[in-house]
Image (spheres, grey):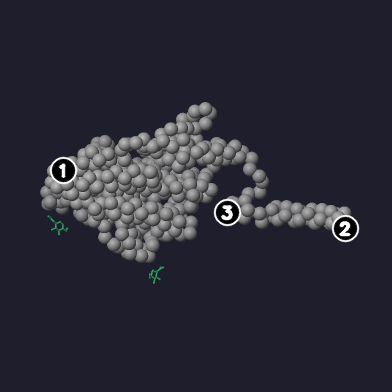
């Protein structure tokens, strides 16, 4: 009996192996090898194996959840060291320094890091040594057509911008496109420069770039509303920046002057605001930085209606920079493929939940305060989530209510919180900005310090 079985079982086993091999050979095994339907893999990995091992080895270095090791980080004992988040130290980032200040200053979008760790397999990309060495793509452009297609797809899924029949230009972050836009909208050879304006409080880069480029064709003129009230003639040439939602206060804004306008939509994503409908302006600028959180990748895009303006954009990007990195474009393509999975639900739900949770916890702390107030938030219908919801802006625009607290940043600093003062945004120092888009550790520490500050208020009332 036993011998009989050995023989038959052996034959059956061989038969199964043969059938399985034929199945794999015919491509049926792809579903085990990769989920990506675009690409079929026939043979085992050869030259990517070492790179993959290297990438996984560095990702496996434990930094206690309070830091990350990177392949291009500083090396110690032959391997990259942990780079710890603020206030954490030690070789594995496990030591929290007591009394460390909560730094809510920068707009570094680290809050999305956990999403990309959860989507590690889908978002990793391998770059061969010979990847796109040319200045140009095969169609003789500086921009990936495939990437452009994905950006248009993304906007149509989110419903936040009209892209049909519009031109698109890529830039090194949206920062490069902001200055390209001023150049493209300014009047050449005119007797007086175009006036660049923005509504206070505004993102300071508009002013600093315009000042830095110091052109004969444009100059920074300050606040839109005071410009409007002081300049009553119609024949002056103005370029208006409209940031919507606004940095620092999160407000959805519209053009005041209705002339040449640059819509900066860096934060016009469901993470931060209800999407009431698609933006349909002549010139709209978006950035990867606040969409997927990859500020370090330096990628942004402009959506342009007018052909002449588009050509001036291309001229600017070509003449000043010869286009943007092809490596960046490959990486962005991979990230956007993940972003549009399941019609964007995983990414946008993650980002919105995170922002909403932070706002809920923050407003619960600040509701006990009479000393600090924040911007008002109003319910709006969000087409993307198909529900009415509050905005959950990237920043809290804090106002110090006490007469004597006219330097709100200094008040927070005394409470061991670093913020960005109103003056940076050409506003009053009675206001200051707190970032809610940094790491979870940064947020937890910020909340702890704010709670301490607010409880001091209560004690002082009780002792009065
Ligand atoms: C309103 C606004 N626009 C543009 C940018 C620039 O972003 P990036 O150059 O990373 O695209 C920022 C960055 O914080 C911003 O807040
Ligand atoms: C501006 O002047 C330069 C040189 O005089 C000329 O080549 C260019 O075409 C002019 N541009 C416009 C928009 O008139
Ligand atoms: C500006 O132009 C508009 C329409 O062209 C006109 O209605 C308005 O009165 C003008 N304003 C001034 C101050 O000239
Ligand atoms: C949006 O929600 C409403 C009610 O909540 C529902 O009737 C409607 O079908 C939904 N629309 C879409 C496009 O899902
Ligand atoms: C041309 C003109 O009248 N420009 C004035 C517009 O208003 C600003 C103040 O906001 C003045 O400084 C300009 O001289």
Residue assigned mark 1: 406
Residue assigned mark 2: 1
Instruction: Give the mark nearest the N terminus, 1 or 2.
Output: 2
Q: Is mark 2 within 8 Å of ligand 4?
A: no
Q: Nearer the viewer, mark 3 or mark 1?
A: 1
Q: Residues within 10 Å of mark 2 (few under 14, many from 20)?
A: few
Q: Residue at x 66, y 56 (%)?
A: 28
Label 3 – label 1 distance at C-alpha: 57 Å
Q: Residue at x 52, y 44 (%)?
A: 125
Label 2 – label 3 distance at C-alpha: 45 Å
Label 3, secondary structure: give it: loop
Identify the mark at residue 35; answer none if there is no mark: 3
Q: Residue at x 76, y 56 (%)?
A: 16
456 vs 338, nearest the viewer: 456
Q: Nearer the viewer, mark 2 or mark 3?
A: 2
Does residue 240 appear anywhere in the picture? no
- Relative side of 210 to 27, left or right: left
User: Taking 153 as reference, is 121 above or below it?
Assistant: above
Kindly indicate whether the residue at mark 3 contacts the one at mark 2 (C-beta within 8 angstroms).
Answer: no
């Amino acid at each position: 009996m036993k011998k009989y079985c050995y023989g038959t079982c052996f034959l059956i086993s061989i038969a199964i192996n043969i059938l399985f091999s034929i199945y794999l050979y015919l491509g049926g095994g792809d579903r085990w090898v990769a989920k990506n339907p675009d690409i079929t893999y026939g043979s085992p990995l050869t030259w990517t194996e070492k790179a993959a091992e290297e990438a996984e080895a560095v990702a496996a270095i434990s930094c206690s959840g309070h830091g990350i090791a990177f392949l291009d980080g500083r090396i110690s004992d032959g391997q990259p060291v942990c780079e710890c988040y603020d206030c954490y130290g030690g070789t594995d980032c496990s030591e929290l320094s007591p009394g460390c200040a909560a730094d809510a200053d920068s707009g570094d979008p680290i809050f999305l890091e956990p999403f990309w760790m959860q989507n590690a397999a889908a978002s990793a990309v391998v770059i061969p040594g010979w990847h796109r060495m040319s200045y140009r793509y095969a169609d003789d452009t500086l921009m990936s057509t495939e990437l452009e297609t994905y950006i248009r797809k993304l906007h149509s899924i989110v419903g936040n911008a009209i892209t049909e029949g519009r031109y698109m230009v890529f830039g090194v972050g949206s920062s490069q496109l902001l200055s390209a836009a001023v150049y493209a909208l300014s009047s050449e050879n005119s007797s007086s420069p175009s006036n660049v304006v923005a509504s206070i409080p505004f993102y300071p880069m508009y002013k600093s770039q315009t000042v830095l480029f110091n052109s004969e064709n444009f100059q920074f003129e300050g606040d839109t509303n005071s410009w409007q009230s002081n300049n009553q003639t119609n024949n002056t040439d103005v370029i208006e920046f409209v940031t919507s939602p606004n940095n620092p206060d999160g407000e959805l804004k519209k053009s005041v002057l209705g002339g040449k306008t640059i819509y900066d939509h860096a934060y016009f994503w469901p993470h931060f605001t209800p999407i009431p409908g698609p933006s349909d302006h002549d010139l709209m600028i978006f950035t990867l930085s606040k969409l997927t959180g990859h500020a370090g990748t330096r990628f942004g895009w402009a959506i342009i209606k007018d052909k002449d303006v588009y050509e001036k954009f291309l001229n600017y990007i070509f003449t000043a920079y010869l286009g943007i990195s092809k490596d960046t474009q490959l990486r962005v393509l991979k990230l956007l493929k993940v972003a549009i999975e399941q019609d964007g639900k995983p990414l946008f739900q993650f980002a919105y939940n995170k922002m909403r949770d932070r706002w809920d916890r923050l407003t619960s702390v600040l509701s006990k305060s009479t000393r600090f107030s924040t911007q008002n938030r109003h319910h709006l219908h969000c087409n993307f989530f198909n529900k009415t919801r509050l905005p959950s802006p990237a920043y809290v625009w804090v106002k110090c209510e006490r007469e004597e607290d006219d330097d709100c940043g200094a008040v927070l600093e005394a409470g061991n919180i670093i913020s960005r003062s109103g003056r940076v945004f050409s506003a009053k120092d009675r206001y200051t900005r707190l970032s809610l888009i940094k790491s979870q550790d940064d947020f937890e520490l910020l909340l702890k310090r704010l709670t301490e500050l607010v409880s001091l208020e209560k004690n002082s009332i009780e002792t009065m």
